[in-house]
Amino acid sequence: VEYHADADAPHTAELAVAVADGLHHRGVGTLLVEHLVSAARTDGITAFTADALSDNHEVLRLFADLGLTATRHFDGPEVHCAIDLHVDETYLTASEARGRTADVASLEPLLKPRSIAVVGAGRRPGSVGRALLHHLHEDGFTGRLFAVNPATTAILGVPSYPCVGALPVVPDLVVVASPAGTVPAVAEECGKAGVRALVVVSAGLDTEQAEALLTACRTHGMRLVGPNCLGVANTAPGYRFDATFAAAHPRVGTAGVAVQSGGIGIALLEGLSRLGIGVSTFASLGDKYDVSG
């Protein structure tokens, strides 16, 4: 997306936007134009002009739905559009609504995954990764479940593969319980494979490892819970899964719980259960590199 100032019309610029075919209908164009509006206003631009073919309904709808005042002038097969960059309550409300919608959509792979892989699940009892895999398997996750371990082909009856790239499908969610030093490389591999969300329970990342983890998530568009967290869970029948290493599964209910500390999360779940209160979704956010309250 770009604009070019009009030498003959002060404070006016011509807008151009293009989105790759594979990224249509995801709000990319709208977000790009929204950022450009902010940059243009800073530069003193008060209006955009744009030309589009009359049958280019997608871009015309993009201009109309921005929340800014837009006018159209039809000239044969083309439409000349003018967009007033004056920001009012209508635009701010539309922008906030887009943000909320995007937030919800981006969290779906975390809370409603159709497939999950656990990196760091070992064959011997006692590891966090094995406990996570056991919880997912025992809780009856209805989607596809995989382990990632190069030393075996199955753990707890769950098929295991040597790396994320070798999995038969790209999982929506990858739970990482491997040593801190391996986490950035695992995250990068997940991103290149097309994974959409990570839960990193691993702790002890140093500054360089932390930066590399977050860079991988930002570069590849993955949402991240953690590191240093207890995990996430959803008790809804259609999505039921428990990707935590708490002693017991969360009780089914309607309370949504987000907590930073894993220890407090366990105590809270136990306390709610004693009161007869169940949860719909649970997230231990850990160090909150990305997803927060």
Image (spheres, grey):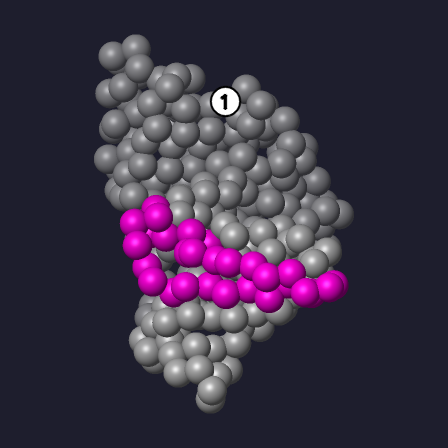
Q: Position of residue 88 (x, y in %)?
A: 30, 54
Tell me the residue at 26%/13% (across/down).
274
| 266 inside magenta stretch | no
Span colored in magenta: 66-93
Could you tell me which quadrant the N terminus lies in? bottom right
Q: Position of residue 226 (x, y in %)?
A: 38, 51
Tell me the residue at 62%/69% (across/down).
51
Residue 245: quadrant of the picture = top left
The relative height of residue 269 versus residue 186 in the rendered view (above or below) is: above
| 76 inside magenta stretch | yes
Q: Position of residue 271 (x, y in %)?
A: 24, 20
The relative height of residue 201 versus residue 266 in the rendered view (above or below) is: below
The relative height of residue 224 versus residue 273 in the rendered view (above or below) is: below
The relative height of residue 6 versus residue 146 in the rendered view (above or below) is: below
Q: Position of residue 122 (x, y in %)?
A: 56, 46
Mark 1 closeness class: few <14, some 14–19, many ≥20 residues within 10 Å: some
**Mark 1: amino acid:** Ala
Viewer-proximal residue among 139 and 95: 95
Viewer-proximal residue among 13 and 93: 13
Could you tell me which quadrant the C terminus lies in? top left
The residue to which callout 1 is attached is 236
Left or right of 62 on screen, residue 161: right
Residue 60 in sight: yes
